[in-house]
Each structure stands twice: as C-alpha cells, then as structure tokens.
Amino acid sequence: MLRVDVTKHLGEFTLSAAFTSEGRVTGLFGASGAGKTSLINIIAGLLKPDRGIISLDGETLDDTAARVHVPSHRRRIGYVFQDARLFPHLNVRQNLDYGRRMNRLADDPAQRGRVTDLLDIGDLLDRRPGKLSGGERQRVALGRALLSKPRLLLLDEPLGSLDEGRKVEILPYLIRLRDEGIPMVYVSHDAAELRQLATQIVMLRRGEVTAFGGVKVLTGSST
Amino acid sequence: MFEISPTEWTAILLSLRVAVVATLVATPLGIALAWLLARRDFWGKSMLDALVHLPLVLPPVVTGYLLLLALGRRGFLGAWLADHLGIVFAFRWTGAALACGVMSFPLLVRPIRLSIEAIDRRLEQAAGTLGAAPWQVFLTVTLPLALPGVLAGMVLGFAKAIGEFGATITFVSNIPGQTQTISSAIYSLIQTPDGDLAAMRLVIISTVIAMGALVASEWCARRATRRLHGN
C-alpha cells in the first residue's frame, strides 16, 4: 500500500497531493506541467517534500514532522525514466546487473533469465547503450530496474520518447510486467495507455489531485 | 653525440621519478578537490578555487620561496615535520616532487573538474534509485565517466612536473644526484663552457619524453571517450 500526502513548492508552482493506493498499477494521469514527475520524484526520494508523509507497505519513507527522509538508495523503489538513462560506459549485461551489485544481492541466474526473456533482451546483452534503438533502450531500463528487486516500480512516461510503432512494441511488455504482480506507479498523459495498464487512477491538475478511483475516472478525458 | 654521461642519466632518472611521484600523489587529491569544486557549494569555495590556481599565476620563484619559508628546515611546517615525523623536504628529491606537484596541481585539477561538471547528473540519480550509496555512485558512475578528464589532467600535470624549473630550483636548489632535474641540469650546462652539446642531448631527451606523454594521453583519451559514448 502506497500512501502519499505531500506539499512541495517549486518556484511559482505548488504540488499538493494526497492519496492512498492499494492498486497494483496506480496511474498518475495529467497534462504536462501537472506535477506528475515531481510527485514520483518525491516518491523515489529524489526530491524532498516541504511537508507531508510518504509511506510504503507501512514503512515511513518521508515524514517531515518527524524529520524522516529515507534517501533514494535505501528505498528499494525502482525507477524507469522517460529517457532510459542507461550507463553509457557499461554494456547491457552490466547495466542489468548494476542494481544487484549495488544492493549486494546474491546472483540469481533464474530471475535474470526470466527478466531477459520477458523483455526479449537476451540478444542485446553484449551491446553498448549507444548501439540500441529507443525501444530497446527502454526495455533494458525496465529490466535493469526490475533486477534490483524493488518493492515498487515507478515508470515516468516510459513510452513518452517513442514513436507510435515503438509504443506498440513496448506496451505488451508492460502488460506482462503488470501481470507479474509487481506494484507500479505509472505516469502518463495518455488516457488510452492508462486504460490498458492501470488498475487505479490519480488524476492531477496544476499540482492538485482532481479525481481518484478506478479507470472509469478517465472517461471523458480525450488526451 | 649520443653518449649520455652518468650525470645526465642521473638527472633524467631523477626527473622521471620526481614527475611520476608528483603526479601519482597529486591525482587522488586533485580528483577529490575537482569533485568538491564541481559538485559542492560551501563557504570559502571561491577562495579555495583561487588558492588552487595561485601557482599558475604567481612567479614560480615566489612559489618556491614560499615553500622554502613553510617547509624548509627552519620553516614552521618543515621544522615540525622533521622533528615529529622525520620528513624532510628541503634539498631532497622529495622536495622537488612537492614543488612540481604544487606547480602542476592547477593543470591537473582543471580538466578533471570540467569532465565531472560535464557528467549528466541524472545518471547518478538513476544509480541512486538502483540502490547505489553516494560513494558507490562516485566509484561506479562519476569516476569512470570522468576518466578522460582524469587522464588529460594527469598528462598535463606530468608534463608540467617534468619541465618545472623555477619553484624547484628555489626550494631545493640544483644539487647533482639529489635535486638536479633535467631542467636544472640544462640550466647548469648552458652556463658551463663546452656544455652546449650535453645541453642539446638533454633538450632532445626532454622533448622525446614530453611527446611520448602527449601521444600516450591522446591514445588513452580517445579509447576512454569511445568507451564512454556507449559505442
């Protein structure tokens, strides 16, 4: 269970969001500039809220009143960025292995095999990120986040930088991932995408939650 | 003409030793300082920055003299180091290495700092979300990505150290076998009648060393850059 109740001032913009989600895939929906990325950066621990609480499965990650702020590397929250952010000096295999090494987890070839199969990246292992297409990069980024064994996976418009053809290429993998059962927060400004993926929707507008509920709250949203 | 005399050999080997030691000791310090200047804001940052660059703008004689005042036998730091730790810099090759290290430090730090500043910090954030603690991020992302700058800084620093003259001769003098580097040997030779030929030999040798360092660094930098662009 993810509980969010935070306020953050960013220049002129104020983000003020509160929701509790039990859903397997929580969709953060809103136009660009609505505060979606800031909100998941706060959940990831990359941004400190000015006020409020973040908790995951009963563990407090942020509590400004109690001066608690768990740094991002201790949260065990995976993050798939819009721009993949693969490490350019490591090949795909090393990128995938990075989280395991940093968390000093035991080598788990079975899990690695499952993830590379799930995402069809077995043929890319010896390549450098510079030699991958946009869609391939995004799949590797997904695999890299998954293999760090996170409790929650944050996805910030993972299809945002891809053209239509590539989106169609990645979407089935995301659906497979959802059916694996790992809880996700999925940021998108595309209602159609969220209808396919999300189980719960948080609608953001100018930094505030305007609707919360099942996918039916997307009804009437054309974008 | 290429009969290198034992005195010349001594000067060549001493120069190499001084420059290698100065570069190897200065590099970790330079990386730490470059990181600090590139990534942190703190009180006195611009002062520290100016202090690092000071040897670049001061006359080398002044830097050498300041080192002598501070670290000479009767200098406030030098006396303490000699009495308590048995470390003596004055008129020793270690003093030459120190002088060269100080003089080359700004040239070493600058490329490292620039390459750290050029790193996409979002990659470091990504490493954090994968569970890397800040020191792990530094070792596995920042440092490898800054490698071309580190190599460039090391070569520049080494080249400066091997050619250093003013501060070294002021601080540790020009004692053959002790503190006489290639530069100070050339200086002595061109003041000696019939020293021209020997001086010319050393000039050629120092040119070869400098060229070799440049070629090696170019090669390393090109390899490192190719690696880092993910190709």
Image (cartoon, coloured by chain):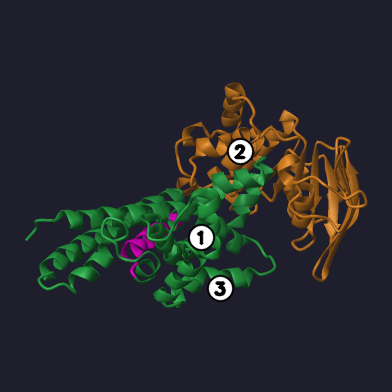
To which residue does mark 3 refer? B50
Query: Which quarter of the rendered picture does the N terminus of chain A lie within?
Result: top right
Mark 1 Cα-neighbour bin, 10 Å: few <14, some 14–19, many ≥20: many
Q: Which chain is orange?
A: A
As rendered, which of B204 and B15 lies closer to the eye?
Answer: B15
Q: The green chain is which one?
A: B
Residue type (three-letter) at the residue carrying disc 3:
Ala
Q: Earlier in the sequence, mark 3 or mark 1?
A: 3
Tell me the chain of label 2: A
Tell me the chain of label 1: B
Query: Which quarter of the rendered picture does the C terminus of chain A lie within?
Result: bottom right
Residues in magenta, as a range: B150-165
- Of badges 1 and 2, nearer the viewer stands 1
Which mark, residue A144? Answer: 2
Q: Where is residue A184 in the image (x, y as percent from the top left)?
A: 76, 40
The number of discs equals: 3
Q: Is mark 3 on a helix, strand or loop?
A: helix
- Tell me what residue is drawn at x 83 percent, y 56 percent: A49
